[in-house]
Image (cartoon, rainbow, N blue to C red):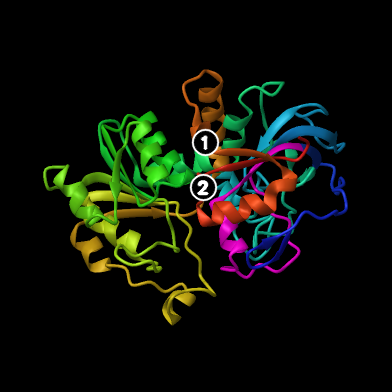
């Protein structure tokens, strides 16, 4: 439970219950801490104390509403972080990240996240899943590949989504900015899609090492301009495509301060003319902790002139998880994908406060944490 900036606590709350015939109650066996949880944890959103975090959830169905038809008690399931109805205009078009039903007045809903509806998060022993037939993805019984499957809730599909937004095709080169979990998933997904060369830009040694281990080219942006480093390795042209897996808390190259538009502007320079950018990294309309008044209102100085001059295309927005999770699940089942290489720690739920602190400070190799409420 969020208590205030840089403070979460384990507290006893009321058990979730069936509220609608289409609901199920899931006994959570794995739930991951997401980098976007840190935005709330750091007080960088409008989140109020009392929110139960957790939008990357996997578990076993404990109870099913009488209107649920395709699921039964005992089914092992993973849920997209998006809460979606399945029948509105956006859902039927495949844009489940922008459901028009579940969060009136806003396009999109999610578990345990500020402004994303009344859905209590799953960093808890149990979670209620609405529209369960639509939102639950069945998994093989047992506990095999648990840390692979839990990543289907968010970061594996989100990394893949970055490639979709950039329209990454076989044989192309890709620059991925950000070597955190989503950035590594974007690089990994680019390789699964047949990219010829993938660069990963970051400054954290463990992340750059992990990128190199999966076959990407690590670029340390503190050493020299990342765009220039990438151009030097692409015959001066730049990559075919680029992915922003950082978002609005991007760090300036030469100083330890935030520069919210720096990744977008670096990508404009890193990608060749007529290429494309995919931006799954989070940007917000209001940032209370922004470095200047414009940034606090979500207004950033982006090199639109260069974007236009180079004829670049840009796709943005959060991931529509259901568009990808079934196929990615099947790749995991058949050992064609193993995204759990990003998981650094598996801990009982009780250790969440310490995990949040260490993940936020990027210490002791904390890159991706999976919590087990029933450990």
Write down the residue under mark 1: 324
Q: Nearer the viewer, residue 210 or 156?
A: 210
Give the extent of the magenta segment: 28-57
User: Quick check: can you spot residue 39?
Assistant: yes
Residue at coordinates 69% horizontally, 49% vertically from top-left?
352
**Residue 42 x, y percent position in the rendering:** 58, 65
Q: CA distance from mark 2 to mark 1?
A: 9 Å
- Asked if the magenta segment contains residue 300, the reply would be no
Q: Earlier in the sequence, mark 2 or mark 1?
A: 2
Residue 237 appears left or right of 166: left
Q: Residues within 10 Å of mark 2 (few under 14, many from 20)?
A: many
Residue at coordinates 54% horizontally, 47% vertically from top-left?
95
**Which quadrant is the N terminus positioned in?**
bottom right
User: Quick check: can you spot residue 273?
Assistant: no
Q: Nearer the viewer, residue 319 or 351?
A: 351
Q: Which mark is residue 319?
A: 2
Q: Residue furthest left?
A: 235
Q: Residue furthest top?
A: 334
Q: Residue furthest front?
A: 364
Residue at coordinates 50% horizontally, 24% vertically from top-left?
331
Q: Secondary structure at mark 1?
A: loop
**Residue 226 x, y percent position in the rendering:** 25, 53
> Picture quarter containing residue 301?
bottom left
Residue 124 appears left or right of 334: right
> Does 301 sit above or below residue 251?
below
Q: Residues within 10 Å of mark 1 (few under 14, many from 20)?
A: some
Q: Secondary structure at mark 2?
A: loop
Asked if disc 2 and disc 1 are in contact, CB closer than 8 Å, the reply is yes
- Asked if the magenta segment contains residue 34, the reply would be yes
**Which quadrant is the C terminus positioned in?**
top right
Numbered disc total = 2
């Amino acid at each position: 439970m969020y208590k205030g900036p840089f403070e979460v606590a384990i507290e006893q709350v009321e058990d979730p219950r069936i509220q609608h015939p289409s609901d199920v109650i899931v006994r959570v066996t794995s739930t991951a801490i997401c980098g976007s949880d840190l935005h709330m944890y750091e007080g960088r959103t409008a989140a109020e104390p009392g929110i139960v975090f957790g939008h990357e959830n996997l578990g076993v169905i404990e109870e099913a509403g009488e209107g649920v038809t395709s699921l039964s008690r005992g089914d092992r399931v993973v849920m997209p972080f998006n809460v979606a109805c399945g029948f509105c205009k956006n859902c039927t078009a495949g844009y489940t990240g922008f459901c028009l039903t579940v969060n009136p007045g806003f396009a999109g809903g999610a578990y345990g996240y500020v402004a994303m509806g009344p859905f209590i998060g799953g960093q808890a022993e149990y979670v209620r899943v609405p529209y369960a037939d639509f939102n639950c993805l069945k998994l093989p019984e047992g506990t095999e590949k648990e840390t692979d499957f839990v990543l289907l809730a968010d970061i594996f599909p989100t990394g893949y989504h970055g490639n979709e937004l950039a329209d990454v095709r076989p044989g192309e080169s890709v620059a991925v900015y950000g070597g955190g979990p989503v950035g590594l998933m974007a690089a990994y997904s680019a390789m699964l899609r047949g990219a010829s060369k993938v660069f990963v830009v970051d400054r954290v040694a463990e992340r750059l090492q992990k990128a190199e281990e999966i076959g990407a080219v690590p670029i340390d942006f503190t050493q020299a301009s990342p765009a220039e480093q990438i151009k030097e390795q692409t015959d001066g042209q730049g990559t075919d495509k680029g992915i922003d897996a950082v978002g609005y808390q991007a760090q300036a190259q030469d100083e330890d301060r935030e520069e919210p538009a720096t990744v977008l502007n670096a990508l404009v320079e890193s990608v060749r003319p007529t290429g494309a950018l995919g931006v799954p990294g989070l940007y917000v309309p209001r940032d209370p902790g922004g470095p200047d008044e414009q940034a606090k209102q979500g207004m950033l100085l982006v090199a639109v002139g260069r974007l236009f001059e180079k004829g670049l295309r840009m796709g943005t927005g959060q991931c529509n998880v259901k568009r990808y999770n079934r196929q990615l699940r099947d790749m995991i089942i058949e050992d064609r994908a193993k995204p759990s290489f990003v998981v650094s720690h598996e801990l009982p739920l009780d250790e969440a406060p310490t995990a949040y602190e260490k993940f936020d400070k990027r210490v002791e190799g904390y890159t991706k944490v999976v919590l087990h409420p029933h450990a």
